[in-house]
Image (spheres, grey):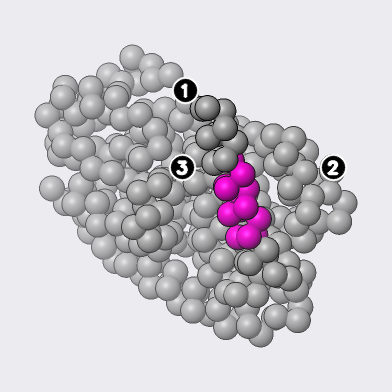
Amino acid sequence: MKKTIVILILTAMLFALTSCSTADNSSKPLVYASFYPIYDLTSKIAGDKLEIKTIIPPGVEPHDWEPSTKDVANMTKAKVILYLGLGMDSWIQKIKANAPNVDFYEVSKGVTPILEGGQPNPHIWLSPKEALIMAKNINDSLKQSFPQYSNYFDKNYETLKNQLEKLNQEYSHDLSNTKHKTFIVYHSAFDYLARDYGLKQEALVGIDEEAEVSPARMAKVINIIKNENIKYIFTEPLSSPKPMQTIAKETNTKILPLNPIEGLTKVEEKEGKDYLKLMEENLENLKKALNT
Ligand SMILES: [Zn+2]
């Protein structure tokens, strides 16, 4: 009985999927973006001319993600794949070897990387200044692979560029005269933001958020909070805030979210949030933490 129901549901889902994909696939060329921020910026430039998909699904933390055989097979069907580089999506090499007909573009090209233990920190999208470079790279890439839509892409890119420049001006202005310069986060995701806007990030763990928090690091961060009289510390939506809760208790600080925007949560997706909205929210919370 149960089995029949499952089969019925699966058949219904399959029908729904097939009808969906025939409806919106039409004849639009397929472009893959490795993870959310690239997906969102690309969608804004591509408008209705291309079908954009993210490789890493929403709500999934992208640092340790690896493609399945099925993912690899799907990606070889794309016309274009946009990836970040800087070690964030190094699995792309595996896809490259299997997809001789796909155009690959590295979106971080031209960014001056911050090195951490000899490795580049990949989190460039969290600084509007670097996001401007990403958007330009994406526009150039799309124009190279789809020259027939060049004017259309350029128009959308101009709109996006203006929005990012406005965001950059807000960050520069609002973060230039804050009471504190140091902010406390879980993983080392805001290095470019700190560099570009004159702040200092103190992270509990490095680039890899799966890493274990060391008691020495914990003690050091607690000391910084006490010495600098910091009132708010930051957690992120896709990783466990437990060590941050311990610190908050220990130092009598409050917790605010600071989003590394590595993948949308289901809730954020439902609320229609996008890169620009989340960056505005990050700025609001930074202002609150740095001015209290
Ligand atoms: Zn990260």
- Could you tell me how far apart the alpha carbons at marks 2 and 3 are, in whole angstroms? 28 Å
Which residue was labeled with disc 3?
A: 59
Which marked residue is nearer to the observer: mark 2 or mark 3?
A: 3
Q: Is residue 151 left or right of residue 186?
A: right
Callout 1, which amino acid?
A: Ala
Quote the CA–CA distance across marks 1 and 3: 19 Å
Q: Position of residue 154 (x, y in %)?
A: 61, 80
Disc 2 versus disc 1: nearer the observer: 2
Nearer to me, 44 or 77: 77
- Residue 64: percent from the left, percent from the top? 57, 31
Position of residue 269 in the picture relative to residue 226 (left or right): right
Residue at image mark 1: 211
* Number of numbered markers: 3
User: Which residue lies at the image location 21% right of the left edge and 38% below the top edge?
Assistant: 255
Closest to the observer, 196 or 100:
100
- Mark 3 residue crowding within 10 angstroms, few (<14) / some (14–19) / many (20+): some
Q: Residues within 10 Å of mark 1 (few under 14, many from 20)?
A: few
N-terminal of the pair, mark 2 or mark 1, is 2
Instruction: Tell me if I can see residue 196 in this picture.
Output: no
Toward which corner of the image does residue 237 lie, by quadrant? top left
Question: Which mark sits nearer the N-terminus, 1 or 3?
Answer: 3
Residue at image location 63% in from the left, 78% down from the top: 153
In the image, the segment drawn in magenta is 10-21
Q: Is residue 170 above or below residue 37?
A: below
Q: Main secondary structure of the magenta part?
A: helix
Q: Which mark is residue 97?
A: 2
Tell me if label 2 and label 1 are in contact, CB under 8 Å: no
Q: Residue furthest top?
A: 215
Membership of 60 in magenta stretch: no
Taking the image as shown, residue 189 lies to the left or right of residue 155, namely left
Residue 231 showing in the rendered view:
yes
